[in-house]
Image (spheres, rainbow, N blue to C red):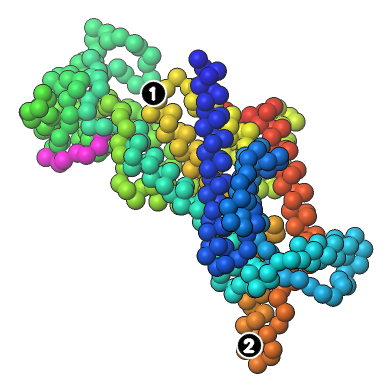
Amino acid sequence: MAVLAFVIGVLVVVVGLGVSIGLHEIGHLAPAKRFNVETSRYMIGLGPVLWSKKVGETEYGLKLLPIGGYISMAGMYAPVRQKTRIRGVLGTLVQDARDANHESLEGVDTSRAFFRLPVWKRIVIMLGGPFMNLLLALVLFTVLYSGIGLQQTTTTVAAVAECVVPAGTEAAECGTDDPASPAKAAGLLPGDTLVSIDGAQVATFAEASEIIQAHPDEELSVVVRRDGAEQELRLTPVLAEREIAGDDGEVTTQSVGFAGMTAQVARVQQPLWSGAQATGDSLVRVAGIIVQLPVRLWDTAVDLFTGQPRDADGPLSVVGVGRLAGEVAAAEAPILDRVGAMVGLLGSVNIALFVFNLIPLLPLDGGHVAIALWDGLKRAWAKLRGAPEPAPADATKFVPVALLVVVFMVAMGALLMAADLFNPITLGG
């Protein structure tokens, strides 16, 4: 059964990744068609074509590997007539790119070419893909936080301690000399819902704990809801040493008021804006990983060859994401917990797609945006000087850089896949 659940988890991520890629490409395709750019292909996946159908001028299809996708637009690069002045291998690469670009424009209505569009329209088309991933991440995090909800302690009492056990002891049962816990002495019962303490309304168990800890050896009025009716109890917290977690996560031992009760844990739906906040937090975290990507990859390689545990917040390949999804699906946890974890995982994947595609290097979307901005600056400078409009920016000069980016991406993918197979990040960290 666990194996079947693992496979289902992997399939869910594969389908989710395919949907994310498909929406990314629709983000490019929709404005391209709106701006009348000739689009010949819309493909989800890489490798051999599994299915395709031509509708109008565009062939729509699915390919074998759900690890990418693309749309084919006419005239992605402006044609350049003169020969390149760059010598050597780099010059050959640039010239080959120019020749291939000329061949791709043969028989194409260049009035509908991408490079003919105003700068702002080119930017809209190229940012449309990442924007769809950001929008999908926002929807997924909103579903997770405001629909499914987060596991939180509630104001309902889960258990009441029989006695006060001295701090630092490992006693599992009360001794004859151990005093009854304040909660037990006050008459609190499992299932009671805390309404107010010392006259202050409490909406969370953390608020109740804060009041109790601040009033050792003081009698407090505690209003609880029991069997649908409210009743007042009298609670006197005792001074006891307890471990307290600070805002920085550091745990210290402090003398505080102690009652001896624990709270029930339940899923609590968060405010609607929580999804947007989670999206922003994820953006900051993923951007930090991308900025440090070379260092993170080096650490991953070292951990792979030394067998050291990997950083749980480090980069993953598709294999790693699928493996985590399988572990989530096979975990012994309530189904809603597993669904929530899968939704959060897919949201994080879409944030990663958004941030990575904004890197201003070809062939990524951010690279095309950078070329369009460069073209716009050239035109603005010429207009400012009263000079004729310059020729479109020559993007083929950056083909060597694009090739290096592709090589880096292939090498990165190979490294991360090897690490995810032989030194994986697991649910345990």
Which percent across, then down, holds residue 220?
13, 33
Task: Sort mark 1 into few (<14), some (14-19) or many (20+) by Cα contacts within 10 Å.
Answer: few
Q: At 68% across and 69% down in the image, what residue appears?
A: 109
Quick check: 205 left or right of 339? left
**Which stretch did the figure color magenta?**
199-205
Q: Is residue 120 above or below residue 268?
A: below
Describe the element under mark 1 as helix, strand or loop. loop
Quick check: 217 left or right of 33? left
Asked whether residue 172 appears in the rendered view, the answer is yes
- Outermost residue, top side: 176
Residue 334 badge: 1
Quick check: 429 left or right of 250? right
Describe the element under mark 2 as helix, strand or loop. helix
Q: Is residue 125 above or below residue 154?
A: below
Label 2 sits on residue: 383
Q: At 80% across and 63% down in the image, what residue appears?
A: 103
Closer to us: 188 or 344: 344
Residue 58 badge: none
Closer to us: 128 or 184: 128
